[in-house]
Amino acid sequence: MPVARLSSRALVRISGPDARPFLHNLLTQDVETLAPGQVRFGALLSPPGRLLFDLFLWGEAEAVVLDVAAERRAALMQRLGLYRLRAQVQIEEDARPVLASWPDVRPGFAADPRLGALGGRALGEGSEADADEAAYEAHRLALGVPDPATDGGQDRRYPIEADFDLLNGIDFHKGCFIGQETTSRMKRRGAIRNRMAPILFDGPAPAPGAEVLNGDLRAGEVLSGRDGAAMALLRLDRLEGELTVDGRPVSVRLPDWLTSG
């Protein structure tokens, strides 16, 4: 069972007497009931409901630790500082590493809240890494699970387009959070035209931003990938027929968790 250190992720520790209500009113996930040792998946959205930061929330006895893209940690801390106002919270960097085990949950790890087949996550040096992050990313892509920080599109995508509603990233029963009105309306009305999903092809991955075409019609765009597979943002009403990218044929592989959601 391999373990990789996810160098692309970094931690922010939120502590103080108001830490949980402060985060609960901001994030798409229920923070009030987050138990010590428990991990949940969520996001911080813009007021219009677009995805700003994808997050894992780790419960601790005296704090909540946010697992965010390393290159976005400073921006997250700045954004949280703007929302702090009079809340009694401390916002600090946490130097511990983020680890992932797959395909199963290694002892001492918590199950990935997005999808059981992803394996587990842990904070700290509890297990020695014996695989690189690229191997974990290949596992994630094989399962068709988007990672907005890796696949691009933050600040432009809605969380439902990144499948957060199907990957336990949004609690629709928790009450208010930033961007809730747009998010709830999209889910309630079923107005979901686009979703992230994997595409398969022969050879190297097309460049990010390359168009997926259904004949002459735009059916989506490539977000990121590797030889033979890529994550794309696809129009759900244009997946039937022959799809191409840069003149090469591609096929869409919708994972079971997406089609049954």
Image (cartoon, rainbow, N blue to C red):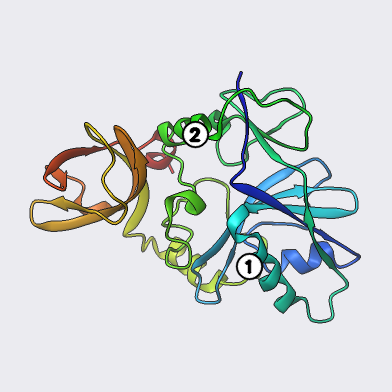
Q: Is residue 175 visible?
A: yes
Q: Is residue 164 visible?
A: no
The answer to whether 40 appears left or right of 246 in the picture is: right
Which residue is tagged 1?
75
Residue type at mark 1: give it: Ala
In the image, is residue 43 above or below residue 9?
Answer: below
Q: Residue 80 at x, y = what percent?
A: 71, 70
Secondary structure type for disc 1: helix
Residue farthest left in this picture: 216
The answer to whether 128 appears left or right of 63 in the picture is: left
The answer to whether 188 appears left or right of 81 in the picture is: left
Secondary structure type for disc 2: helix
Residue type at mark 2: give it: Ala
In the image, is residue 77 above or below residue 145?
Answer: below
**Residue found at x 80% / y 66%:** 21
Which residue is tagged 2?
134
Distance CA(mark 1)–CA(mark 2): 25 Å
Q: Quadrant of residue 77?
A: bottom right
Q: Quadrant of residue 231?
A: top left
203 and 147: which one is in front?
203
Q: Quadrant of residue 118?
A: top right
**Residue found at x 45% / y 46%:** 146
**Residue found at x 63% / y 47%:** 9
Q: Residue 159 at x, y = what percent?
A: 49, 59
- Lower position in the chain sequence, tag 1 or tag 2: 1
> Crowding at label 2, few (<14), some or many (≥20) Cα neighbours within 10 Å?
few
Kindly identify which numbered label has been placed on residue 118: none
Q: Quadrant of the C terminus?
A: top left
